Structures are given as structure tokens and as C-alpha cells.
Image: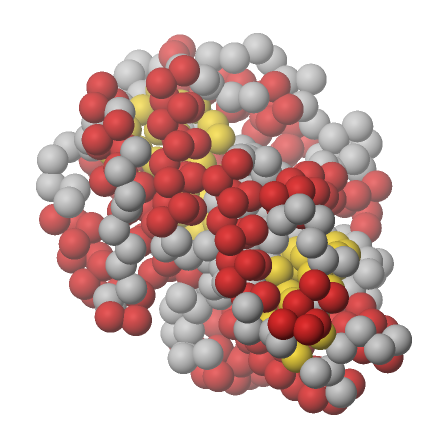
Amino acid sequence: MKPLTTLSLKTLSSDVIRQQFRMASTSKAKTGILMLNMGGPRNSGEVNQFLNNLFADRDIIKLPFQSKLGPFIAKRRTPSIIEKYNEIGGGSPIAKWTELQGKLMCQELDKVCPETAPHKSYVAFRYANPSTESALQAIEEDGVSHVVAFSQYPQYSCTTTGSSMNAIYRYYQQNYPLKPPGPRGTDGVTWSVIDRWPTHPLLVKTFADNIRKELLNFPENVRNKVVLLFSAHSVPQYVMNRGDPYPAEVGATVQLVMQELGWSNPYRVTWQSKVGPLPWLEPGTEQTIKVLVKRGQKNLMLVPIAFVNDHIETLHELDIEYADELGKEVGAERIGRCAAPNDDPTFIACITDIVANHLKTGEKVKPQMLMTCPMCTEQTCKHAKMWFAKATGSLNPV
């Protein structure tokens, strides 16, 4: 595969990205790549709705009297979250990055997979615009023949990828309850799913290369002593108790990255972005930084191992709250942060390779996607997996 051209987001406004994206998609798309992610508010005016959507989703967090308490929490948190977004430029860049990643990926897919071209990516955010529902409407309007539901979370969790899959299921149940999905349908649209990719060699290489680059910013005499903190978004412990595979898949990515690095540095997996008083995955990234520095390990690197692009969790939580403010508070010598994949050519090659192999092999959906967690009692999850089993023409879920 030829090297991909890297476009700088600093010189490419969102309007230009959208204009180029539309120009590149004037011909009818044959294959639609639905890029599933959490999303983020593009400006301060979208923060409250983003938080309302987030705290209404029982897949990610369960609250008592959720329809009342969720909006209450969202309203209380809105001013402080707006302030944080203002500190990183006024809004989340996740939409810009996802649009750009999808555009670059589809350019390459048109070259390496001419039999399924033209390809077009559709950004489908769970809690922000463009929403999953608007992306599905656009796919219908464009007359796409085959849809690939492509999770942008490398490691699967019911709270992230699972929530997006449930949203797709609910959209079709609410709008087309009597319409059989997939091969049994009458519209000729087929579906397939890429639900996880934690061990892809180019994902591993992207993070390993970015870690090596960031290590060069530390003094040479401490470089091999820098503690690598692989920081992933935490999830409630009760989700793990159901048998969610997320921590195991994060660990798989981390192990391969360290192997690629030749086990050059000490490391740990930590968890960030906890919300509310309930137990979540630990140890927390913030608490780990405090303890390590107190023990004399004052050179640390934060690695956003579960994020494929920059957003508030990297630009504010890791960069400002932890690397800068907490670092000064506890007396760290240096806390660096490994770059997120964004439009790194190796990462664009990674997602291109994932989709290209998926299309060329005719893969529909992995059996793991169709299996519910051992202790799961959520009927929506079960019904969604049944819908995808039918939509992809696969066996019934377990």
C-alpha cells in the first residue's frame, strides 16, 4: 500500500473538511462505512444536550429515576464542562478527526477494493452530532448497497460499542418494526460488523511509534525509567461483573505495544474519567500519578490506549488536569503524553487494512459480537444481537 498523505487539522477547518468530503462523495456510494463513536460537543451550545444524551444512556451508566436525575446532573455539570471545552478551543475536535479519518480511509479503500467502491464514511456519534440516527438516515438517502458498522473503539465494551449497536437496533425497530433486516429484507441492503480490533499490528505500531517519539522529550539519563501509564476510559464495576471483555482487550493491546517496544520501560494500566459515586475500574490514573511520584518515580508518560483521536479526555483530562496541574501539585519532573492516532499515516493504513480485509474476505460478524455477557440480563442487548445476527445473515446469538 502506498503511503497516505497526512493532512494537518490545524490548517484544515471543519467547513473545508466537509466540503472536500462532499466533493469526494458525489458518485453514489456502494459501500457505506458507519464510524461509531461516543462523539463530543462541537461548541458550548451543544454541551448540555451532549450531557443529557450521555446521562440518559443506561448502557453506560445506570441511575435511579434516570429520566429525572439524568437531566438534573447534566444541567449541574454543564457550566464546568463548558469551561473545560473553552480551555481546549471551545469544543471537541472529535468530529473533525473522525471525518478526516473516514475520508482518508475511503480514498485508500477505493484504490485497494475497487470491487466494493465507491466507499463513503458516515460519522455516527452516540451522544453528539452527527448522531447515529442521522447517519442511518443519510445511508438510506444515499442508497448504499452494503453497510459496515465499524466501531471506532478498538476494545469492545457493552458501554461503548455495545451502546452504539443498541442504538442502530432501536432506530430500525422504531422506524421499520415490520421490515426484516439484511438478506431477508426487500431493499437489497446488506450489513456486516467490525466490532473490535485491539490487536491489529498497525494499531500496535501506531502507539509504539508515538511512545518512542514522546520518550525523546525526556532527558536521556531517565528515558528508560519513564513509567508508561496506559490510561483507558473507566467503566462501572457492575458492568465488569457481567463479564464485559473490555479490560481484557485493553490488556491485550498494552501487552502487544510493550512487546513492540521490547519491554523497554516499566508500565501499568490505569483508568480515567470516572463519573459518580459507584465503584468503577481501578486504579484511577489520577491516584496512580500521585502514588508513583510520592514513591520517587517522577517521570511518567500517559498513553491514551483506548482512544483513536483527541478529544476532551486527552486534551483536557490528560494534558491539563494530570500532566500539567497535577504534575505541578505533586512535584513530578515531567509527565508527557503520547500522541493519539488522529491522522497518523500508520493509523490510516490500520483502519484501511481492517475494512479492506473485512470486505475482501466477505466477513459478516464475529461470533464474539453475537454472544451476550454471561451475567447479562439486559433484554435490549439480547434483542440487538439477534437483530444483527439476522441483518448479517449469521447464526442466532448465544
Give the image location of residue 220, x and y in percent: 63, 72
Q: Quadrant of residue 288?
A: bottom right
Q: Residue furthest front?
A: 221
Describe the colour scheme in one phrase: secondary structure
Residue 38 visible in the current orientation? no
Between 225 and 192, the one lying in front of the other is 225
Q: Is residue 117 left or right of residue 180?
A: left
Task: Looking at the picture, tell me which residue is in the foreground, 234 or 331.
Answer: 331
Which residue sits at x=80%, y=37%?
A: 242
Horizontally, residue 44 falls left or right of residue 365, namely: left
The foreground one among 279 and 195 is 195
In x, y percent, where is residue 156?
62, 39
* Quadrant of res 307: bottom right
- Where does the image place residue 340, in percent across and percent down from the top left? 50, 59
331 above or below 220? below
Residue 301 in the image: above or below residue 296: above
Judge whether 173 appears above or below 161 on screen: above
Please identify the residue farthest to the right as the structure is shown. Answer: 295
**Closer to the camera in the image, 393 or 356:** 356
Q: Is residue 10 left or right of residue 371?
A: left
Q: Residue at x 66, y 46 (%)?
A: 262
Q: Is residue 225 visible?
A: yes
Q: How many numbered circles are shown?
A: 0
Quadrant holding the C terminus:
top right
Occupied quadrant, residue 337: bottom right
Residue drawn at x 68%, y 57% is 230
Quadrant of the rendering where the N terminus is positioned: top left
| Residue at (58, 80) in percent of width and height | 320
Name the spot of residue 162 as percent of width and height, x first: 59, 39
